[in-house]
Amino acid sequence: MSGYLCIKDIYKTFLQVSSLRYSGLALSEVSPSPLSHDTVSRWLKSRCSRPKDLWRLVEPSIDKKSPCVLIADDTLIAKTRSKKIEMVHYQFNYRIYDKDSDGKTKNTHFSEMLTLAKKRGIMPEAVVMDAWYSSLDNLKSIRSHGWIWVTTLRKNRIVNHNKQLNKLDISEEGTSIHLRGYGWVTVFKFTAKNGRIDYIVTNKENPTRQYLKSIMDARWPVEVYHREVKQNCGIERCQARTSRAQRNHIFLAISAWFEQHKRRISEKITLYQQNWDVIKSAITEQIPVLLAYPN
């Protein structure tokens, strides 16, 4: 095949429908047009897909006037058997965390992405993140944009000048505390059925317990997304060794998930049902063939 643009479309569609194998060889075996696995490998190494390309893809589907929550989270892309693959640090995120090449920490990426979100016209009701992103610099960065933040704090965080958070008596309606280096915020204590305790903190004035619960519950779809893009779109399964090929595969896996997500919304079909429909078609075709074999 000569057209690189065609390879991009075929590769993305391949990630949408394949639930078992994601290699260039596997793609070459099922491609609707002649395509060698070497061509796929060369294409992955030569393209330059970036996060801004994903924004161009999803922006038409975003209603910037509707209430929204901006969620910061990360996920690991496991490469435990791939010591020779570039960028393997047991940390990825999109932004891709690759400190050796750009020198940026996850908190640097976080701050830059906040600025970029505002530039793109995103005006969230709140920015939500877990304790990993609750550093003073991050909280101040959110405040500088005029935004509300909601996060969890670790139980040993020092507040009220010299006390650990878990040593305080926290009211059911929330308690004002002084966060060292930041100022006054409100903390709520949530106890899960398994006994786990979460300390949820916000800079919102006069927050209610129900408000914080609804905001924190909004994080769950991101966890679902991380699971789906791994299980359904093979984001962890690229066998190429170069950093550029890995980055292109990650971009296309996320793009493939987005196409599946659009079908989920428009046709009310889960991602798992979409994958099963592909497998079901193959099984339906093969059963008569196998039944025709002589005993």
Image (cartoon, rainbow, N blue to C red):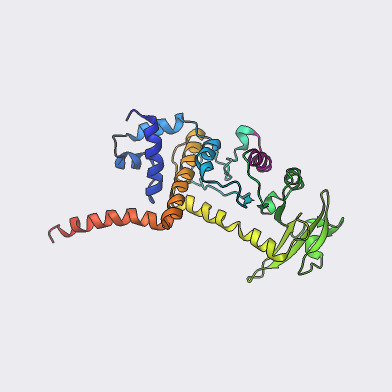
| Residue positioned 57% across, 49% down in the render | 75
- In the image, residue 12 sits, relative to residue 189, either above or below, namely above
- 247 horizontally vs 189: left or right: left
Q: Is residue 110 left or right of residue 294?
A: right
The residue segment tinted magenta is 103-119
Is residue 202 among the parts visible in the rendering?
yes
Q: Is residue 84 visible?
A: no
**In the foreground, 32 or 63:** 63
Q: Main secondary structure of the magenta part?
A: helix
Residue 235 spot, x, y in % from top left? 47, 46
Q: Is residue 251 above or below residue 266?
A: above
x and y, in percent, of residue 96 in the image = 57, 40
Q: How far across and down, in percent of the image, does residue 129 sit?
A: 66, 52
Q: Is 189 situated left or right of 261 in this image?
A: right
- Does the magenta portion include 18? no
Viewer-proximal residue among 28 and 276: 276
Name of the residue lying farthest toward the right: 161
What's the residue at 69%, 61% (across, down)? 212
- Residue drawn at point x = 43 percent, y = 40 percent: 239
> Residue reaching furthest front?
65
> Looking at the image, which residue sits at the far bottom?
193
- Left or right, residue 250 beside residue 116: left
Identify which residue, 83 or 94, lies in the foreground.
Answer: 94
Q: How many marks?
A: 0
* Residue 196 picture quarter: bottom right
Q: Quadrant of the C terminus?
A: bottom left
